[in-house]
Image (cartoon, rainbow, N blue to C red):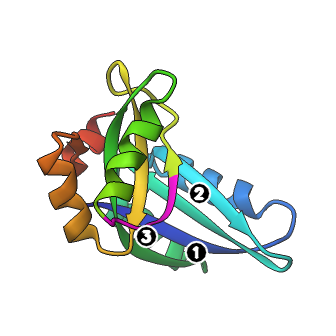
Amino acid sequence: MKITQISVFLENRKGRLYDVCTLLGDHGVNIRALTIAETESFGVLRIVVDKCDAAVKLLRDNGFVANFTDVVAVEVPDRPGGLAAVLKVFAENDVNVEYMYGFVEKHSDKALLVFRFEDAEAAQQVLARHSISIITSKEIEGL
C-alpha cells in the first residue's frame, strides 16, 4: 500500500523552509517525515504529512510548486543491522531503491522508513512475501 509524499521545489535562499513549515503549521498540517535534497540554486523538500490534500492546496495557493509522489513506508527492526536486513531482501529480489528517508517519530518498537522504488508494485509484492510491514496512509494520519 502506497502513501503520498509531497515534493516542494524551493529556491535556495534564507527562510524558504521556514516559510513552508510556518504555512503548514499555521493551518494545522503536521509534518510526519521530511528530507531535503539541494542543488546550488534550488532544493526539493519531500514531506509526508497528516493532511496531504490540504497541504498541497495551501502550498499551491501560496505560490509554491508542489507535487504528489507515491512512496512506500516500511517498518524496519530498530536494532543494529535492521535496515541492512530489509535492504538485503530488496537486493536479492532485484528491487531498486531510488531514495529513502526515515520518520522522526516511532510507530512501535520499529523504525519507519519511506522508500521511493523504481517499481513500487513489484517492491510491495516482495515486501509482502517477506512479511515486512507496510504502513498505510491511515496509520500516517494517526501518528
Instruction: Name the mark on residue 23.
Output: 2
- Separation of marks 3 and 1 at Cα, in angstroms: 10 Å
Circles 1 and 2, Cβ within 8 Å, touching? The answer is yes
The kind of secondary structure element at disc 1 is loop
What residue sits right under mark 1 in the picture?
A: 62
Please determine whether, in this image, residue 118 is positioned above or below residue 33: below
| Left or right placement of residue 81 versus residue 141 in this view | right
Is residue 139 among the parts visible in the rendering? yes
The residue lying furthest to the front in this view is: 92
What residue is drawn where x is 52% and y is 35%? 104
> What residue do we see at 68% from left, 65% from top?
37
Q: CA distance from mark 2 to mark 3?
A: 11 Å
Which image quarter is the N terminus in?
Answer: bottom left
Q: CA distance from mark 1 to mark 2?
A: 9 Å
Note whether residue 1 is visible.
no
Nearest to the observer: residue 24 or residue 122: 122
Residue type, mark 3 in image: Val
Residue beneath disc 3:
56
Q: Nearer the viewer, residue 97 or 1?
A: 97
The vertical placement of 70 against 111, above or below, is: below
Q: Secondary structure at mark 2?
A: helix
Q: Which residues are magenta?
A: 94-100
Crowd class of label 2 (few under 14; some 14 to 19; many from 20; radius 10 Å) = some
71 displayed left or right of 124 = right
**Residue 111 falls left or right of residue 108:** right
Residue at 46% over, 39% down = 84
The three-letter amino acid code for the residue at tag 2 is Leu
Q: Which one is earlier in the sequence, the residue at label 1 or at label 2?
A: 2
Label 3 SS? helix
Q: Is residue 32 left or right of residue 2?
A: right
Q: Position of residue 108 (x, y in %)?
A: 32, 22
